[in-house]
């Protein structure tokens, strides 16, 4: 998606979550994902492949997610779409500051 994004294209609901380590006092900790925001987005498959790891196939898809501009996004957050967590690979700002494009990777079973 380039240029302006029509508001009607932002019809998928996604959530942003940030990681937080809950330390146990003995040098260890547990990773928890804390909800940050729910927003509307356009979500499109960008690329996909099925890497073979230990004789198990797991589909991986790179998703192009476009949202209205936000200044608080972080690459260490994740996106949750249709119950599936997606790792953020890159955050690509729009020079006009109208929207933000996020490249994210996750399973292909959407």
Image (spheres, rainbow, N blue to C red):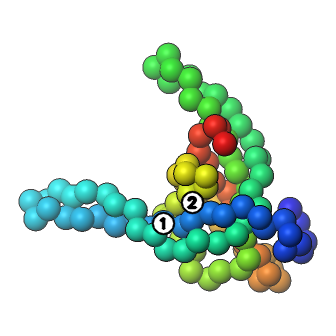
Measuring from the top left, give residue 99's x and y in whole percent. Answer: 77, 76
Q: Residue at x 55, y 51 (%)?
A: 83
The answer, for residue 66, to whether it is visible in the render is no
Q: Is residue 69 above or below residue 11?
A: below
Toward which corner of the image does residue 102 lie, by quadrant?
A: bottom right
Horizontally, residue 24 falls left or right of residue 76, namely left
Toward which corner of the image does residue 88 lie, by quadrant?
A: bottom right
Say which label, 2 or 1, has the lower sequence index. 1
Measuring from the top left, give residue 78's x and y in whole percent. Answer: 52, 60
Horizontally, residue 73 falls left or right of residue 10, namely left
In three-dimensional space, the C-alpha distance between marks 2 and 1, rounded to whole angstroms, equals 6 Å
Q: Residue at x 55, y 49 (%)?
A: 84
Horizontally, residue 33 falls left or right of residue 5, namely left
Quick one: quadrant of the C terminus? Answer: top right
Q: Residue at x 61, y 55 (%)?
A: 81
The residue lying furthest to the top in this view is: 55
Quick one: quadrant of the N terminus? Answer: bottom right
User: Label 1 crowding class (10 Å Cα cut-off): few <14, some 14-19, many 20+?
Assistant: some
Measuring from the top left, give residue 62's x and y in whole percent. Answer: 68, 46
Label 2 element class:
strand
Do callouts 2 and 1 mark residues in contact (Cβ within 8 Å)? yes
Residue matched to label 1:
17
Label 1 element class:
strand
Measuring from the top left, give residue 34's x and y in whole percent. Answer: 40, 68
**Picture mark count:** 2
Give the label on residue 79, or none: 2
Q: Is residue 52 above or below residue 44?
A: above
């Amino acid at each position: 998606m380039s240029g302006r994004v029509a508001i009607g294209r932002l019809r998928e609901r996604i959530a942003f979550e940030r990681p937080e380590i809950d330390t146990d006092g003995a040098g260890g900790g547990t990773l928890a994902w804390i909800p940050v925001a729910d927003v509307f987005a356009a979500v499109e498959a960008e690329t996909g492949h099925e890497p073979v790891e230990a004789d198990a196939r797991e589909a991986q898809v790179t998703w192009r997610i476009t949202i209205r501009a936000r200044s608080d996004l972080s690459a260490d957050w994740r996106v949750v779409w249709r119950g599936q967590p997606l790792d953020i690979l890159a955050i690509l700002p729009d020079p006009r500051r109208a929207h933000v494009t996020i490249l994210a990777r996750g399973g292909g079973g959407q």
